[in-house]
Amino acid sequence: MAEAVAIPARRGDLERRVEELRFLIFGRSLPAVLFALLGWRVFLNLLAQVRALPVHAGIGDVFAGTVVISERGPKLEPPPVMPPALATWASTLQLSGLKPETAQLARQFLSRATQLHPQVRDQMAYRITSDVVAQISPPPPPGVPPEYVLAAVLAERHRRELMRLRPAQPAGPQPPAYPGPVALPVAPATAPPVQPETGGFTPPG
C-alpha cells in the first residue's frame, strides 16, 4: 500500500513542476518574450565582435566606431652593424646584382646564427656567403669570416637604401650678388677765363 501511495505523489509533484515551467515560458506576454530573446541576440553578437577585435581595442572604441583593424606583420630584425675593418671595402661594392631574396636569406641567417649548432651554422654561412659574393663585386678581402662579409654587405645595402629614400636637401639661399665698383664720371677740368691785359686803362663805354 505504501508503494501505491508514493507513485501518485511523485506523479503529482512532476505535474506541478511541469505547470510551473509552462507558466514561466508561456505565462508572460508575447512581446516580453520576444524582447528578451532579441536582447540576448544583440548581446551575443556584441560579445562575438569584441572577441574578434585586436587586443589593444577597447569597448569604448566599439561604441564610438573608432576601431582600426590592423594586420600584424612579421617583426623585422634591425640591420647588422658594419664591421669597421670592412667599411672601406663595402663602400666600393656594386650591389645592383644582389637579389632581394638572397639578402633576406642572409639577414634571417644572421639574426638566428646564435641559435644554430656550430657545424650547421658554419655550413650555412659558407653557402649563403658564396651566393652573396657571386652577386656582388669586388670580392671581399681574403681571410674574412663569412659572417663578417654578410654583415658588411647588408649594412651597406641598408645605408644606401636610406640614402635613396631620404629627400634631397634644398639648396640654401644664395648671397645676393653685389655689382663691382662703378667709376663715377669726372667732369673735364676747365681753365679759368683769361682777362685781357689793358695796362690799367679801362676804355670808356
Image (tube, rainbow, N blue to C red):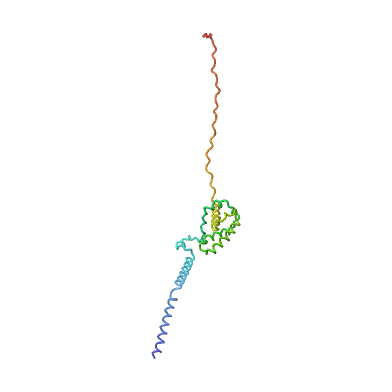
Total marks in image: 0
Left or right position of 34 against 98: left
Q: Residue furthest left?
A: 2
Name the spot of residue 147 as percent of width and height, x first. Answer: 54, 58
Reply above or below: 198 against 176.
Answer: above
Q: Nearer the viewer, residue 104 or 185?
A: 104
Position in image of residue 77 (x %, y %): 51, 59
Does 163 sit left or right of 24 as displayed?
right
Q: Nearer the viewer, residue 91 or 126?
A: 126
Residue 202 is left or right of residue 134, and the answer is left
Q: Is residue 4 above or below residue 197?
A: below
User: In the image, residue 188 lies at what x, y percent?
Assistant: 56, 23
Q: Based on the displayed image, in which of its 4 quarters is residue 11 positioned?
A: bottom left
Instruction: Choose between 203 and 146: the one closer to the eye.
Output: 146
The percent position of residue 51, horizontal first and vertical second, equals: 48, 66
Q: Quadrant of the N terminus?
A: bottom left
Residue found farthest to the bottom = 1
Q: Nearer the viewer, residue 49 or 181?
A: 181
